[in-house]
Image: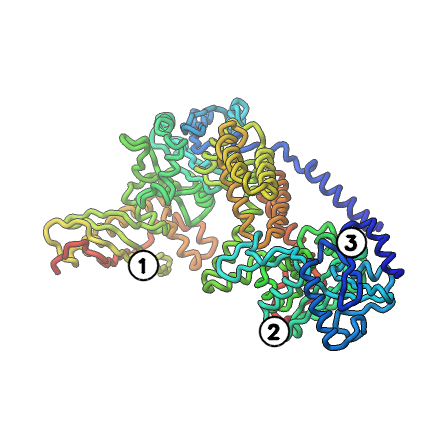
Amino acid sequence: MNLLECLKSRQELDSDLFLTPMRLSDRTVTLAGYTSLIDMPQTMIVLRQLAQNDVASDHPLFALDSGLGVAMQNPDEQALLDAIAEGDLLIFSDEADRCIRIVPVSRTLSRAIESPTTENVLRGAISAFNEDLDTNIGLVKKHSLSEKLRIRSYMLGKNQRRRSVLLHMEGQNHDRLLESISNKLESLPDKDIPDLQALSELLGFSKWSLISRFNTTELPQEAASALESGKVVLLLDRFPFAVVLPSLLSDLFVTQNDRNFPTVFRVSFQILRILGLLANVLLPGLYVALVAVNPEVLRIEIALSIAGSREGVPYPALVETLLLLVIIELTLESAIRLPKTIGPTMTMVGGIILGQAVVDAKLVSNILIIILAATTIANFTIIGFQNATALRLYKYLLLVLSAMFGVLGLFVGMVIICAYLGHVSTFGIPYLTRWKTGGRHG
Amino acid sequence: MRKCVLRMALFASIVAWTPVLSGCWDIKDINHRSLPIVMGVKQVDRAYKVLLLIPEVSPSEAKAKIVSGSGNTINEILDEINKNMEYKVDLLHLKVIVFERSIAEKGLDQSVESFMRSKDIPNKTFTAISEGALEPLFEKLEASSGSGGTEVYDFFEKNAGWSPEVVQTRIWEVFRSMDSYTRDVVIPIIKPGRTTTIESPGGAVIKNGKMVGDINSEESLLYNLFKGSGTQGKIEVMDHATVKIVSDRLNTTSEMHAGQAVLNSRLHLKVTVVETVGTPTEAQIKKEIDKQLSMRFNGMLRSAQAKEADILGLGQLFRDEMSRADLQHWRSKYYPFMKINFKVHVVIQDEGLLKIDV
């Protein structure tokens, strides 16, 4: 009776908690759980069915082997609350102070399996992860039907409990990588993981890192192929992305989906992405270097045409470029959160501003418009939004160095970026490693 | 912790000092520089006069203007022009330097050396010699500068209007020839054209930086042939046929026989027949080509030998057979008496759409 009293006092604080009396095979019981998590009418039907079966087979309802869920032995209040919070239903016997915990019919709180929203697939499996962890595990399992797939489950966080699951392929792994990741997850079980940055901190990555140390993908197909190649996949509850560790430079250019195309096309796609990366990082810096510091590198015709198009532009090339780059970044940033109905407005306004008006107003030269359009387009040839975001930053370094030292500055900037990339490593696996399935790294 | 703070401080100081120390505020954008394309140099008595053809571009139109000045040295004049211009004069894009004939005859040493010494004039700038006075030439260039004054550059540029009878000589080649024992150079001669912007009647033979003679367009072709610039597309008109050169290859062997230089050279030409007069046979056409080119070559070489100007750089071929002391006298002791066997081997690759009677 004591436990029930506890829950009753709790109910006053949490109106979502229900305590419903019910007759089950001639006994009065009290059901306890969260209305928002449990589909009550369905659960009651199932309960009645189970109770009748029990009566038919001559089992007392609250016997240990009744088959009606798990009997809780002398639970304390916290254990009860945890069980309810996880969405389970508790059945209290009115006669004895006994309690059974069962898995009810729960409300559908996840969306159905849909096509991805951040990654498009042209040729390949289109289903994407959603917020439900078990669905996600199921999706990965469907995509890699292998008896070697191993799953470890963790409950992380203290205030915010969050289930997370580590998947890896037995025998394919780099042991040290797996050991390090599972050690980190096991050593800090009380740390809350509300977001990926917290996960990154939990895994021991610097918060100042300019490179995403793990890849996120929305596609079970990509997760499965990462597992296949010996990487480790981490799934978090309520997070519709798989976290793939470690992230390497090649993840910018190579995607599993490419393998659905003939080799020649696959290689050309990859070359195109590399060119896209170079164009995105180099073009604004190159423009400033060539226009302001080293015009002798240009051919005379283009030099004259740029000089003509800059006639009357009051700002130096660096300011001009930064001005337009900031407008483009603003456009990108606002487009992310815009409702789809307002999206076209953005396109139109952005198109007009960036298209002609800014040139007519003599704020920037029209060659710069071409350069920045190319830069922005090239930015998104890279695979993964998180990688594209990282790239957006590098071009500013090159831009500033180019404005000061010209083409030399551009190359120095490249060297700095390469040195930084060379210094990054994830659990002893350098970022610039060429990943080999089953290979030894680090 | 201490190390971390130190590192942060170092990083912050690098970030802070880099812009301060770079001097980037002195950088001038491309639209604040004037980029002369052609420079003309002439000498009046002892004073130099420099003319610059500067493109003036705006988004709507492109034209050019002439700026000139005179003074004791070229750099003094450039400085004076720079002072008076609204933009900074930037010679980085200088494409052609035109010398007046009179200054070429007096000697180009001083001006070429100053161009080579200067850091902002590219060494690959073309050189040319104006047959007449510079001013009419520049006025013609200014009048016909539809694309910002790049016409004269396009005239010499291989991927634009260059043709195999026009010599291309860059400033570094002139400089190289000034101190070389075994190589002289030809600078193209230009003048304002009657209907075209400019025309090139031939080239000037420059020996040790001084103009000592000239060659005509036909001979310029042979000069280009020896220089390896290619003769594709040149049309040769003979008595019975007109042919177009499709490709060329030159083999030369050199030997010294008792103090006499002997050069055997064999020119392989592939030609297509463009026009015939009457019905010549293939053998006849080949013979005519051989005769015409050999005569022209021997004529050119004899006159060059007489001036002791090794424009074809034939001395280069004997460098491994002579001591350095002998090389000094190449121009005077060996070159004028060099024996040369020039043979032309012709393949008629194509007879056009009509057949030739064999």
> Which image quadrant is residue B151 in?
top left
Residue B95, given in percent of the width and then of the height, sits at 44, 37
Question: From the image, which quarter does the N terminus of chain A lie in?
Answer: bottom right
Please say whether residue B110 is visible from this viewpoint. Answer: no
Amino acid carrying mark 2 in the image = Ser
Which residue, given by chain and number where applicable, does mark 2 sit on? A146
- Residue at which label 3 appears: A17
Q: Are marks 2 and 1 in contact (CB under 8 Å)?
A: no
Chain of residue at mark 3? A
Circle 3: element type:
strand
Disc 3 marks a residue whose amino acid type is Leu
Q: Is residue A316 above or below residue B69?
A: below
Residues behind callouts 2 and 3 on a single chain: yes
**How is the protein colored in the picture?**
rainbow
Alpha carbon distance from label 2 to label 3: 42 Å
In the picture of the structure, the residue carrying the numbered disc 1 is B264
Name the residue at 34% across, 32% down. Answer: B131
10 Å crowding of disc 1: few (<14), some (14-19), many (20+): some
Specify the quadrant of the image occupied by residue A202. Answer: bottom right
